[in-house]
Image (spheres, rainbow, N blue to C red):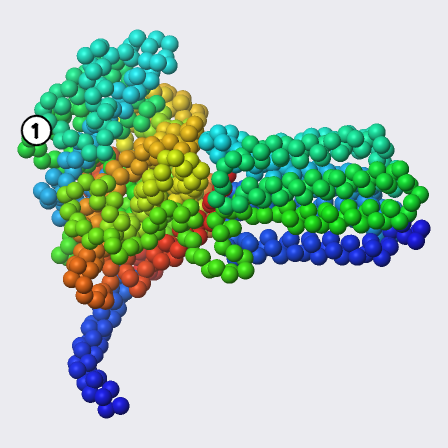
Amino acid sequence: MGLLCSKNHPYNEADAEENAQAAEIERRIEQERKAEKHIQKLLLLGAGESGKSTIFKQIKLLFQTGFDEEELKSYISVIHANIYQTIKILYDGSKEFAQNEADSSKYVLSSENEVIGEKLSEIGSRLDCPCLNRELAQEIETLWKDSAIQETYARGNELQVPDCTQYFMENLQRLSDANYIPSKEDVLYARVRTTGVVEIQFSPVGENKKSGEVYRLFDVGGQRNERRKWIHLFEGVTAVIFCAAISEYDQTLFEDEQKNRMVETKELFDWVLKQPCFEKTSFMLFLNKFDIFEKKVLKVPLNVCEWLKDYQPVSTGKQETEHAYEFVKKKFEELYFQSSAPDRVDRVFKIYRTTALDQKLVKKTFKLVDESLRRRNLFEAGLL
Amino acid sequence: MASCAVRGGCPSDYVVVSIAIFSMISLIVRSTFSFLIHKVPSAKGSAFWIPVIQVIASFNFLLSIVMALNFLKYKKSYWWLSCYVWAVWFEGPLGFGLLISCRITQAFQLYYVFVKRRLPPIRSHMFLPLILLPWVAGAAFIHEKKPLNYRCHLGSHWIIPVVSLHTLYVAVLMGFTGAIRHIEFRFDELRDLWQGILVSASLIGVWVSAYILNEIHDDILWLQVVSRFMLLLTASILVLVFFSISISQPLLSQISLRKREPLELKTMGQALGIPDSGLLLQREEAVDVDPNEPLDKLLLNKRFRQSFMAFADSCLAGESVHFFDEVHELGKIPIDDPVRRIYMARHIINKYIIAGAAMEVNISHRIRQGILTTTDLTHPDLFTNALNELIQLMKMNLAKDYWSSMYFIKFKEEARTRRCGQEMEEMTGYDFSPRLSSVHASDDPFHQDHFSRGFTQDIHASSYTH
């Protein structure tokens, strides 16, 4: 017994220290719990490629410290990968069209360009793509300017051509420079399919002011397999920012080329609205990719999408664009009121026209969102 | 004696009916036990429905024999006691026919996967009704013509086509089983099929002889009693022996119902006997991990892979890493062992590739279709395209955040302490992940432990779902 007692002696100090540590951790956890209550949870939901991660990046740029040089440089490989993948999709697409189409001659490349195409296609399928240098950029540009590739690009909606194609192809010279550092715009255009969940915490009035709202924003993947993970985030959400890319009415899903993207977005929005956890949640619908929409709607009629098949064009130019946009907006409004049970219709529902790449517009839009949420908070607290 | 032979109620009848009831109860108990012990599989997929349909068909079959052959004394005035309902519909399309058709469906699936090495063109929930159609047609025809006599026996003209239909189906089952007899199955599938064929063939033998004896020697009452006794007895044995879960749930059959050997087989890799599957061996070297190396090379190291997998699971992006792991396991199976490769490939497809799968991965439509419509399940490059796409996904989403996460720091610590041979310090405090703030070791709103356990449970549920 005595032996045990004397053995215990050196541990007493360690014990006391451990207790102090444990108490400190407890205090910190308690502090965090209190702080958590004031944090407003925002979710970015939407189908694949609807612009959620771009909005996420914009929020990071606007309200956090932005991207430092290290982070900007980390996007170089992403941008180069995007370029290789895009040109590969276009080249493989042109081969497919050349085989299957009636007037296949317009999809046939010249023989030198075919050689370039094969080489680039092989590079694009590799796991580790080489860094984009002047020579490769030149070859890509040559291939891009080939009429067959341009014809294929015109039918890009049948392939899975990303929206950043035009932008990157036009800037190839700059992007292939040896000392290239991506600009903020380049980073926003870069396409990365999100998997899993990412979050940031920010305050719209800036980090140093204590009195502002604190938001925690969650970004998720939009493809079908990613959606089963959303359920883990649905508890205690202040607002859902639902991104719908309105320019995708003539495209099919990445994960299911039999399904129209607009119809999928409609069904997904319907599903989200009916979730039991979102009884009191505010819904901010971002009708995104307006810049692509306004150009496309003049060339491709809205009624190629079965959900929008009762659309009647009225005029041309800007008027037509506005009319088409109002039609789509009305469709979403109708959908909202159809899908919301009578007891939920009074939750906050706002629609915003956005172009996620436009920083000023996103800043303005978010200010409106923030105002709307503040007003709702005051209302909930009975002060309004 | 005379009355009981005609109207039912002989002592032997009661004995054999109780044997039938006992057999039915033990069948139900056995099937429920298997489902319960191995955690109820999800209600979709043939892995669940085919055994359930078998149990129901067995019940119908026994009931039809009892009702049709005058085992029990009762008033026969109601329509639902009518001979046609029991002896024709319940015995044929809903009983014996359904039983054999279930087995034929399973044999057909096995044939397609292991001999033709592709995924079956017709899903089992469409195949089963399809092959049941001749039974339904036959039963409807007999119902029309009404050839049964007052004692529920068919005329001798009718017995021949009826028995040939029964024998035909057993012959088809034998045909499919014969086609796969040379395959070395891992999970007793073949043995179960032969067993089923043997018993069903002997049942038909007993039935035919009983019937012939009945008809020829109408007056020999003891023969009637004996023959119907034998018939119900053989049927009871048939339904018990015929039932087996192993064809639908290969992993389950590895775990003994009596729990004599509590083998914890968590992964398909372990069940197939792939070396070092799922184990973290001591002799795995603590390689110094260099963040500049390409991710796919780093992931080949098991310890790094486990650490990265834990990180990915915390960000709800774990399925890509699990997929990498299992495809890596598949790569360990030699090319000249097609059977095991097929088991593993099929398991991977059911778990990761099929739309709506438990751990479905984020791949494009083309790549998914390429895998599902492959003409060779044993091809070594079956999953290469999917793997490349997912490694790209992991690189762009997870790699950067992993290097600054607590998981990597823990990994380095472990490697260091293992090298120094000291005991590992307890890591107190909370896990930090740059992606998600709510990843805490003690307070985990995403129920991380529950999550990873759920994945292993899903192995049982989703194997062989179709």
**Where A11 sits versus A351, above or below?**
below
Residue with the mark numbered 1? A177
Residue B414 in sight in this render: yes
Residue at 68% x, 41% y is B200
Name the one closer to the observer, B183 or A319. Answer: B183
Q: Please report the residue visible at 19 percent of the width from the left and 81 percent of the height from the top.
A: A11
Residue A2 drawn at (x, y percent): 23, 91
* A341 with respect to A320 (left or right): right
State the residue at coordinates (52%, 56%): B256
Asked which quadrant contains residue B442, the reply is bottom left
Within 10 Å of disc 1 (Cα), the crowding (few <14, some 14-19, many 20+) is few
Quarter of the view holding residue B190: top right
Residue A266 x, y percent position in the rendering: 41, 36
Camera-side residue of B94 and A227: B94
- Identity, as a three-letter code, of the amino acid under mark 1: Asp
In the rendered image, the residue lying farthest to the left is: A179
Identify the chain of the residue marked 1, using the numbered disc in the image: A
Q: Is residue B301 above or below residue A329?
A: below
x and y, in percent, of residue A282 in the image = 35, 49
Residue at 16%, 35% in the rendered image: A77
Q: Is residue A150 above or below residue B424?
A: above
- Between residue B254 and residue B151, name the one nearer to us: B254
Which quadrant of the view contains residue A271? top left
Q: Is residue A319 visible?
A: no
- Element carrying mark 1: loop
Q: Nearer the viewer, residue B286 or B30?
A: B286
Q: Position of residue A194 (x, y in %)?
A: 28, 41
